Amino acid sequence: MKGKKLVIAVILALIVCLVLIPTCAFADSEQLVQQSAAGEGGRDNGEGNTTPSNNGAGNTTPGDNDEGKSLPDSGDNGAVDPASGDNSSNVGDGDGTKVEGTIVEKSKGNETEESEVVKEGTSGGENGAPVMLSGTKGAPTPAPASTGLWTSDSGKEYDSLQDAVDAVGNGGAVNLTLNRDGDGDGLMLEEVSKTVTINFGGHTYNVNGKLVGSPGYESQAFHLEKGNKVTLMNGTLTSDRAKMIIQNYCDLTLIDMNIDGTKSAGCSYVVSNNNGSLTVDGSTDITANEGARAFDVYYWPPRYPDGVTVNINTTGTITGKIEYTSNNTPSTKNVLNISSGTLNGEIYVQPNLKDNAAINPTGGVYTDANILDYVNDDAVVVTAGGKFAVNESGYDLAKDGGTVTVVKAPANAPIDDVPAGVKIVNNSGNTIYINGVAVKDGETYTVPAAPAAAPLSAKYFVIEGKNAEWTKGSNADLKFVLNSKDVVKVLIDGAEVEFTVAEDGTVTIAAAVIEALEAGTHEIEFIFADGSCKTTFTVK
């Protein structure tokens, strides 16, 4: 009897174990999934608590900026990088050990299957492939195709330009490419030391999301603080919301860019320069709203005592007002150099800065006559059609052989390569030389047409008999004198005819041959072994 009881007890124990073991396994798996899901709300800070992701509302730190207020700190609390799509969180593996996991949801039709936890690492899977910690639903889900708006030189893609730039540490450098036309938030580059090159790839980036700037003044598409070097190239930057497209305090270069401020009715500055430098190269265009500023050159001590320099070297067009100003501190530390480009707009110089303004136009075409106040004494300035060309040909301003007026030139200045038909009025106050011809002050000179070019010398040609006339019934032979006797064939209207040739190069066509031709003009060609010559004659 005791033996039977023992057997029954053993059987009951086995049944209990069979029931409890899968229950424990499922419990551990469920706990693992729940812990992973909880990890999406924050990141483990190593003390059992989670810290919120960065929402841009972090603490502020003091720093130089255009409004004299502290700049927002990055507020990076180790939050998820939205560009990388990394939803990693620290989760338990059921036995108290921390592992890095990712929640993966698989969809089947309109139904979502239960989540799986996949460990990302270099152990367990072949070649570092993800390892399944629970579930038996097949191979790990591959990473989705990348759809980032921006790509860095490392190959990483981002949806956010701000994230792409923030990923570079202080002192670092990055090259970013815009993959397609796109909209997004503005760019706030803090006062650090980064080298950032953004290639727009022929595309347009429109800042229609979050604007940037110092706290309380977030009205800009790009805000670039001092200490950085930034290059924007090959595309268009605009905004349909910003009051300023670029607030610049760094060393900024624009190459083959279109900086367009006309999409936002409230945009009053396209590029504002308060420190560092701006260099406009290639075929860059800068376009402002009517009455608004294309760019300024603003000296702002004591906050930015080093000053600012703007260099305009573009073959493009700058449309809008240009401001040369300061905080009422006369100085030569705001410098404007212009070597080329078409500048359509007023050049405004703050009154107390005019006497010592460091404005140096050595080239370019302008609509504002005020540029004459700043050109060097050895410059030549011509005007036509309401525009002023400094040391440029300027003659294309006078269409269809119009009039160009020289309004500034040093004595005896040579002005060469002026096209034929252009009329020059000399109001420079000095005698000048137009294509080598002296033109005194107050005189007008029209460039004559060039003489007809002499025909190129030919190896064989007709000396006598060109355009000859022959009368039917005259019974006279037709003769032509050539510069060579080595004629091998004669063609009249393309048909070969008989001829004789003398030592002096006289070719004779018999009267019978000419009599057979119809009245009118005929072409005769003399063929040599290495060339030919031709003329015409008329049969009456």
Image (cartoon, grey):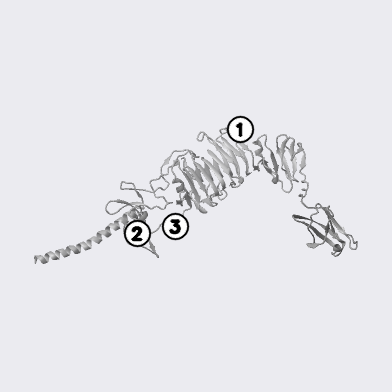
The residues tagged by marks 2 and 1 sit, at their Cα atoms, a distance apart of 72 Å
N-term mark: 3 or 1: 3
Q: Amino acid at mark 1?
A: Asn
Q: Position of residue 388 (x, y in %)?
A: 67, 42
Crowding around mark 3 (Cα neighbors within 10 Å: few <14, some 14 to 19, many 20+) is few
> Farthest left residue?
1
Q: Amino acid at mark 3?
A: Ala
| Residue picked out by circle 3 | 145
Numbered label attached to residue 356: 1
- In the image, what residue occupies the spot 78% across and 46% down? 451
The residues tagged by marks 3 and 2 sit, at their Cα atoms, a distance apart of 21 Å
Numbered label attached to residue 484: none
Kindly tell me whether residue 287 is visible in this rendering: no
Q: Are marks 2 and 1 in contact (CB under 8 Å)?
A: no
Left or right of 473? Residue 58 is left
Q: Position of residue 518 (x, y in %)?
A: 84, 64
Left or right of 514? Residue 64 is left
Which element is circle 1 on? helix
Crowding around mark 1 (Cα neighbors within 10 Å: few <14, some 14 to 19, many 20+) is few
Residue 277 sits in quarter = top right
N-term mark: 3 or 2: 2
Which is closer to the viewer, label 3 or label 2?
3
Q: Is residue 402 above or below residue 524?
A: above
Residue 354 sits in quarter = top right
Which is closer to the viewer, label 3 or label 1?
3
Which element is circle 3 on? loop
Left or right of 283? Residue 147 is left
| Residue picked out by circle 2 | 115
Quarter holding the N terminus? Answer: bottom left
- In the image, what residue occupies the spot 27% across and 57% down? 28
- In the image, what residue occupies the spot 65% across and 43% down? 365
